[in-house]
Image (cartoon, rainbow, N blue to C red):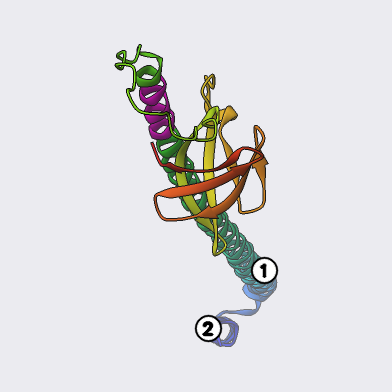
Amino acid sequence: MRRGLITGMAILTLAGCSGSNDEALLAWQAEYESRLETLDMQLLEATEASEKRWEQSGNGIRKMSVEYREHYDEFFSQLAAMRVVVDEFTEQQGKQDLLIASLKEEVDRLEAQLTRLQAVRTTQSSPAPRRPAPTKPVATPKPAAPAFDVTGIEVRGGRPFVAVASHSAQSLNEVRLLEVGEAFSGWRVSRVGERTAEFISGTGSVELTVQ
């Protein structure tokens, strides 16, 4: 449209000029049209370049969007995996705490048994007061007392056990758990009650109470 308008103006100009100037006007018109074509070409190239840049920018934005989404998904996948690890660690820590508490209770119980055992040993090591000689015939002597003490009664798996330790025991490792039928220092367990246990040997039977 612009070129047509300019061409029309050039024709009007030529119509008002004399023959001597025709050649000059025609030359001017040709040069002007050449410049217009050059400008049109430059405008077209600029437009195409601009459209290409816009297309490249759009592709770059889409690529960045895809990469961002991939990083976003990867980050949340790692975060979910970390949460699973933290939950497992918390569960294991809870189990360890329960185990430690149970072991502490067992140690406290055994230490209490050892304390009672040491107190009984101290009492038994004290010299007994002399008794006056009996004036009547001495009754049949009782069987010799076992050389150990009963430190506790336990029930495990529905079966009763008696904890015994020799008079010379110095640590918890020397405490033995016996059930009915088992023997210790020549004495076999024949019965286990709530606070007492009966032992049998070749010299007879004896009932000991938890110390």
Looking at the image, residue 125 lies above or below residue 159: above
Residue at 61% x, 54% y: name it.
Answer: 180
- Residue 35 position within the rendered picture, expressed as x and y whole percent measured from the top left: 65, 67
Which quadrant of the structure image shows residue 48? bottom right
- Residue 187 position within the rendered picture, expressed as x and y whole percent measured from the top left: 63, 39
Q: Which residues are magenta?
A: 111-121
Which quadrant of the structure image shows residue 109? top left
Q: Amino acid at mark 2?
A: Met
User: Label 1, on which residue?
Assistant: 52
Mark 2 closeness class: few <14, some 14–19, many ≥20 residues within 10 Å = few
Quadrant of the frame with the N terminus: bottom right
Q: Amino acid at mark 1?
A: Lys
Q: Nearer the viewer, residue 79 or 109?
A: 109
Quadrant of the frame with the C terminus: top left
The secondary structure making up most of the magenta span is helix
Mark 1 closeness class: few <14, some 14–19, many ≥20 residues within 10 Å = few
Q: Which residue reaches farthest front? A: 136
Q: For numbered disc 2, what is the local secondary structure?
A: helix
CA separation in Å, label 2 and label 1: 36 Å
User: Label 2, on which residue?
Assistant: 9
Q: For numbered disc 1, what is the local secondary structure?
A: helix
Looking at the image, residue 29 lies above or below residue 171: below
